[in-house]
Amino acid sequence: MIVTDFFKAFAQLPDPRFRRVLWLGIALTIALLVGAYAVLLWFINSTSGEPITIPGIGEISWLGDLLGWGSLLLMFILSIFLMVPVASAITSMFLDDVAQAVEDVHYPHLPDIPRTPFGDAFRDTINFLGVLIGANLLAIIAYGLLPFAAIVIFWGLNGYLLGREYFQIAAMRRIGRQNAKALRKQHSGEIWLAGCLMAIPLTVPLLNLIIPILGAATFTHLFHRLNNKAG
């Protein structure tokens, strides 16, 4: 059923509103990655005092090489580690638009609801980012103890966190925070699995650019399916 939710989301890509949010999300993702990479290069060069040289890529001199091919490769690598928090930020900004587009097509009988206030969405994003960063910092210990299982631990942990966040935001729009929390706990296993299926492609450069928006749409379908089952 999770796969069905995903393919419903994927099939809606031609929707003009959906594509608008998709391209905005991709543009924001690239801007955030370039910004993070620029800060990283600036920090390395300012602390070392000399341009850094990377085998197979050559000398990296911060701003001058920011958009070079070597930097592009490094940014792809950096995206593996940054896309999980970036996905969270994008979801909070665009989920209302994605969910509305999904509901207009697949659930037209639902009544209109007001948009989530920006302040509430921003607060939830900051709170979740704190949890996300803290959990991944603690997970470094597990990575060191079980290096052969590090990628599986990463997927499992972030799958749980992303599933929790995406479902909670999608559900709160319709049934409120407390009811969303109760429904999430009732179906925690399926939500965790859906989060893992999202976390895995987030570690694949280029593919990870479209996953946040597809994830938002997929979890909108997942919420309605589970909510209808509960009702």
Image (cartoon, grey):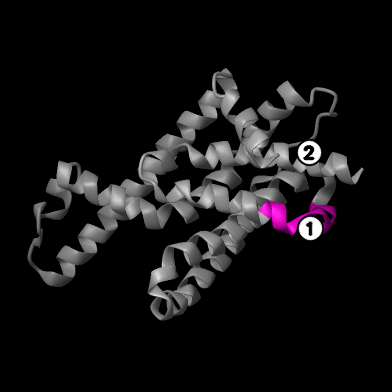
Q: Of the two numbered discs 1 and 2 on the same chain, state the one appearing first in sequence.
A: 1
Circle 1 — which element? helix
Residue 225 place in picture, x, y as percent:
79, 39
Residue 4 place in picture, x, y as percent:
66, 34
Query: What residue is at 84 percent from the left and 28 percent from the top?
Result: 110
Q: Is residue 106 above or below residue 147?
A: above
Image side of residue 172 versus residue 11, left or right: right
Q: Quadrant of the N terminus?
A: top right
In the rendering, which numbered label is found on residue 181?
1
Is the residue marked by circle 1 packed among few (<14), some (14-19), or many (20+) residues within 10 Å? some
Query: What residue is at 49 percent from the left and 77 percent from the top?
Result: 138
Q: Which stretch appears magenta?
A: 177-191
Q: Name which residue type carries label 1.
A: Lys
Residue with the mark numbered 2: 224
Residue closest to the eye, 56 or 22? 56
Asked which quadrant contains residue 217, the reply is top right
Q: Is residue 166 above or below residue 46?
A: above
Q: Nearer the viewer, mark 1 or mark 2?
A: 2
